[in-house]
Amino acid sequence: MSYQITGSVVNDQGVKYAIVLVDHDVVQNISQNEEAINAYRHLFPGMPIILLGRDWQGKSTYYGQKDIVDYISQIDPQRIPWRRYVIAD
């Protein structure tokens, strides 16, 4: 069995990190967001992982390493080079 996620690996100003699109509820729940980050560590080893959730109005909310979140929250999410990752169980 496999499933897909939408994410991006970004190397910006010498900092390499991953952004993963998740349900808005995941970003809002401290136990769920830590579980999600841990679940994606094998896909993005050694990289900080930032979660991006969008509410019903399309407003983006980020969770992760504060300095990266502060930086990318100023960027239009449409400028992020998104791709689909297939994860096999």
Image (spheres, rainbow, N blue to C red):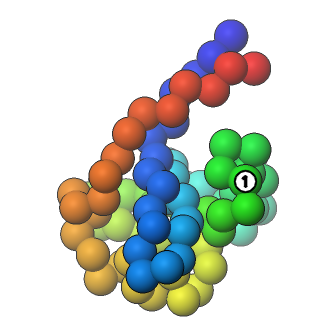
Q: Is residue 21 left or right of residue 78?
A: right
Q: How many marks?
A: 1
Question: Quick check: can you spot residue 32?
Answer: no
Which x, y percent locates residue 27? 56, 63
Query: Residue 37 occupies which quadrant of the picture?
Result: bottom right
Which residue is located at x 38 percent, y 39 percent?
A: 83
Which residue is located at x 22 percent, y 57 percent?
A: 78
Q: Out of 77 and 27, give the one closest to the viewer.
A: 77
Query: Residue 79 occupies which quadrant of the picture?
Result: bottom left
Residue identified by numbered label 1: 45
Question: Quick check: can you spot residue 68?
Answer: yes
Which x, y percent locates residue 57? 24, 59
Query: Residue 6 occupies which quadrant of the picture?
Result: top left
Question: Circle 1: is it few (<14), some (14-19), or many (20+) Cα within 10 Å?
Answer: few
Work out which quarter of the rendered image holds the C terminus and state it. Answer: top right
Work out which quarter of the rendered image holds the N terminus and state it. Answer: top right
Which residue is located at x 42 percent, y 82 percent?
A: 13
Q: Out of 2 and 61, give the one closest to the viewer.
A: 2
Q: Out of 24 and 41, give the one closest to the viewer.
A: 41
Q: Secondary structure at mark 1?
A: loop
Amino acid of disc 1: Pro
Which x, y percent locates residue 32? 71, 56
Which x, y percent locates residue 29? 66, 64
Q: Is residue 60 left or right of residue 1?
A: left
Q: Out of 31 and 14, give the one closest to the viewer.
A: 14
Q: Is residue 49 left or right of residue 37?
A: left
Which residue is located at x 71 percent, y 68 percent?
A: 30
